[in-house]
């Protein structure tokens, strides 16, 4: 089977990889580019563990083919921190103990970042609605919502 050469931008860096026609973006990120922060949960777009931004739009990378990333921009959880300095969302997740097993955490962080880019002052209801596509079996969501609200407040300078 012929492999496809894909040139794309991941977390601001130009990258290239080879993939097969049926290989998902999730598999390309994990297996070809070794970005293992993107997690595989359900492989059907139901859990949000594999959430990434594709050209600024929140998507489940298990539902996108790797070849579809050609010429596009991808942002993953690995691109959130600036060197050793954690993104405010990452810091607040730690402060609020908003993670346990960690499978959902990267996808939730990417989704929350997308929310705050669109709406820097969301209500609790808006946070819960936005994160509804990210399933967590450990935390019960309350700590996650509190962490996102606290990060939003800090990022606004409130």
Image (spheres, rainbow, N blue to C red):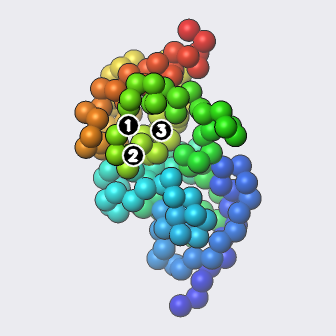
The C terminus is located in which quarter? Answer: top right
- The residue at which mark 1 appears reads as 99
The image's mark for residue 109 is: 3
Count residues near mark 1 (Cα–Cα under 10 Å), then give few for <14, some for 14-19, many for 20+.
many
Of the numbered discs 1 and 3, the one sitting upstream in the chain is 1
Disc 2, disc 1: CB below 8 Å? Answer: yes
The single residue placed furthest to the top in the displayed view is 158
In front of the other: 61 or 78: 78
- The residue at which mark 2 appears reads as 102
Would residue 8 be found to the left or right of residue 153 on screen? right
Residue drawn at 58 percent across, 70 percent down: 32
For discs 3 and 2, the disc positioned in front in the rendered view:
2
Residue drawn at 53 percent across, 90 percent down: 1
Residue drawn at 65 percent across, 33 percent down: 85
Count residues near mark 2 (Cα–Cα under 10 Å), then give few for <14, some for 14-19, many for 20+.
some
Residue 18: name its quadrant. Answer: bottom right
The answer to whether residue 71 of the structure is visible from this angle is no
Residue 69: name its quadrant. Answer: bottom right
- Residue 17: image location, x then y, percent: 65, 71
Disc 3, disc 2: CB below 8 Å? Answer: no
In front of the other: 106 or 22: 106
The single residue placed furthest to the right in the displayed view is 14
Q: CA distance from mark 3 to mark 2?
A: 11 Å
Of the numbered discs 3 and 2, the one sitting upstream in the chain is 2
Count residues near mark 3 (Cα–Cα under 10 Å), then give few for <14, some for 14-19, many for 20+.
many
The answer to whether residue 2 of the structure is visible from this angle is yes
- Residue 135: image location, x then y, percent: 30, 44
- Residue 87: image location, x then y, percent: 59, 32
In the figure, 32 relative to 142: above or below?
below
Would residue 122 be found to the left or right of residue 29 on screen? left
Q: CA distance from mark 1 to mark 3?
A: 10 Å
């Amino acid at each position: 089977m012929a492999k496809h050469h894909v040139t794309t931008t991941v977390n601001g860096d130009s990258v290239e990889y080879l993939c097969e026609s049926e290989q998902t973006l999730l598999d390309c990120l994990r297996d070809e580019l070794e970005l293992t922060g993107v997690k595989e949960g359900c492989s059907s777009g139901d859990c949000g563990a594999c959430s990434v931004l594709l050209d600024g739009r929140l998507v489940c990378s298990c539902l996108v083919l790797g070849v579809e990333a050609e010429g596009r921009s991808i942002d993953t959880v690995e691109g959130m921190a600036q060197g050793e300095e954690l993104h405010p969302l990452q810091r607040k997740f730690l402060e609020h103990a908003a993670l346990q097993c960690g499978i959902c955490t990267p996808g939730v962080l990417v989704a929350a970042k997308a929310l705050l880019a669109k709406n820097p002052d969301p209500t609790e209801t808006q946070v819960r609605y936005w994160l509804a596509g990210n399933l967590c079996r450990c935390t019960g969501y309350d700590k996650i919502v509190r962490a996102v609200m606290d990060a939003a407040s800090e990022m606004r300078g409130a």
